[in-house]
Image (tube, rainbow, N blue to C red):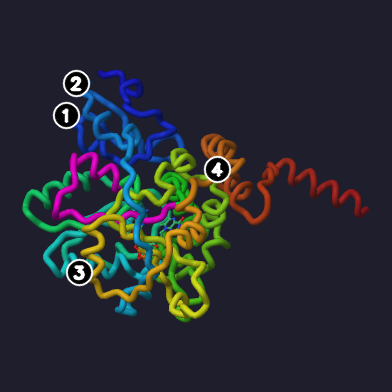
Amino acid sequence: MADTQAALPVAADRCTGCGACANGCPKGAIHMTADSEGFLTPVVGEGCIQCGHCAHVCPALKHREERSAPAVFAAWAEDDSLRRRSTNGGVFAALATQVLEDGGVVFGAAMDAHLTVRHVAVKNTADLPPLLGAKPVQSDVGDSFQQVRMYLDQGRRVLFVGTPCQVDGLYRFLGGYPENLLTCDFLCGGVASPGVWQRLVKSMAYVKQKPPVAVEFSRKEPEGTGHRFFVTFAGGKTYDAPLAKTEFGRGLKRRLFLRRACHTCPYACANRPGDLTLGTFRGLPKELDEQKQGVTMLLINSVKGAHTVDTLALKKTARTLDEAVADNVALRQPREPSPYREAFFAALRQAPFQQVRIKYLAAGEPRDVPTPQALLRTVKEKLWKKR
Ligand SMILES: Cc1cc2nc3c(=O)[nH]c(=O)nc-3n(C[C@H](O)[C@H](O)[C@H](O)COP(=O)(O)OP(=O)(O)OC[C@H]3O[C@@H](n4cnc5c(N)ncnc54)[C@H](O)[C@@H]3O)c2cc1C
């Protein structure tokens, strides 16, 4: 048996879990395995011949070249139905539709039957809807990078959408910039732990006594006034609330359970790995009333990206990079972790999840959950005082 952790090419706190090493290992000796915080992390197992290919493809170990400054647009899909079903302006949906109608393959993140977020390949527009919309949980890329190479080898056009670390990982895995590959990263404030998400899924099932079967993290209100967290349970019952008022949303906002490497993310800047970058444009002037329905911040980072955007069914208006950077922290710097992050994960390992939820994910500051004995004591004291 090979020395497992010692053979990893990158320190655990810098590993983004992009999966380039596992996809690229010529011996299939690297497996993405959930770590103690619930994030997929490479583990080197039997069969490792210490060839160093994993270090060669690891984006965290490579210096990124500085690209010229991106062109910036506020953009939205001409097709209102695509826009309605997307997080922002539906630029991804317009892009994916064009690639699919052209006979290409689109890779993006969807939720499986267990509500695990995974990268999947889609080959026709009828299968596109599960890819639409942001899922704040880190997606499992599985063997997507190998599939991308297979489709490129077949001469097909491929669109890959993912976090900047996944896009960079894909390029490292491929060892170049194939002509038929178009990539799109998004502005990313960090990805949530899939392990924590699954605990919340179980907790929702327990509370409703029915398993959740579908989740939308940012369902658009019909009037375009905000985003909702919308869950459908088996049997048809639903839960619907603003994301920020849910346990998952509070944990996200507090940066309690983002991947450790997200807090030192080298992609939180305007030098992006994808041909295109998508994000939220919030600070647009009032006269751009269109933003009510969602506007995507579109950065064009390469000549290929520029040519593609010219052919898309989009409405767009040019903005400045200064404006984009001022508007969106994800273009300036990584986010600090919550001061409670370590305590949260320590509690997750030791305490029942119900206690962790009440302490860290309820409204207000984290507070200790009284034990049943302490609760009984308090009740007795109150009754005693009343006598
Ligand atoms: C984890 C995460 C964090 C984000 N953080 C920010 C932020 O801090 N600031 C900001 O401006 N925007 C952020 N976004 C991006 C934003 O929410 C929109 O996804 C983006 O603006 C594109 O909007 P759209 O309407 O064009 O496309 P959408 O309909 O949102 O399509 C987005 C695409 O991203 C893919 N995708 C969704 N979830 C994941 C995932 N977990 N992993 C990989 N790929 C995924 C989908 O498959 C789809 O291809 C984040 C998105 C995610 C998923």
For mark 4, give the secondary structure.
loop
> Is residue 231 found left or right of 32 in the rendered image?
right
Q: Which residues are magenta?
A: 167-188
Query: Which label belongs to residue 27?
Result: 1
Between the C-alphas of marks 3 and 1, the distance is 37 Å
Quadrant of the image occupied by residue 77: bottom left
Q: Residue at x 43, y 42 (%)?
A: 265
The answer to whether marks 4 and 1 mark residues whose Cβ atoms lie closer than 8 Å is no
For mark 3, give the secondary structure.
helix
Q: Decide if ligand 1 comes within 8 Å of the CB at mark 3.
A: no
Q: Percent position (x, y) of residue 43?
A: 31, 30
Q: Amino acid at mark 3?
A: Gln
Between the C-alphas of marks 3 and 2, the distance is 43 Å
Query: Does 163 sit above or below residue 223?
Result: above
Query: Which label belongs to residue 49?
Result: 2
Label located before the other in sequence (3 or 2): 2
Label located before the other in sequence (3 or 1): 1
Residue linked to disc 4: 337
Between the C-alphas of marks 4 and 2, the distance is 37 Å
For mark 1, give the secondary structure.
loop
- Label 3, residues with CA under 10 Å away: few <14, some 14-19, many ≥20: some
Residue linked to disc 3: 98
Instruction: Name the front one of labels 3 and 2.
Output: 3
The answer to whether marks 2 and 1 mark residues whose Cβ atoms lie closer than 8 Å is yes
Q: Amino acid at mark 2?
A: Ile
> Is residue 134 found left or right of 45 in the rendered image?
right
Query: Does 107 sit above or below residue 373?
Result: below
Ligand 1 quarter of the rendering: bottom left
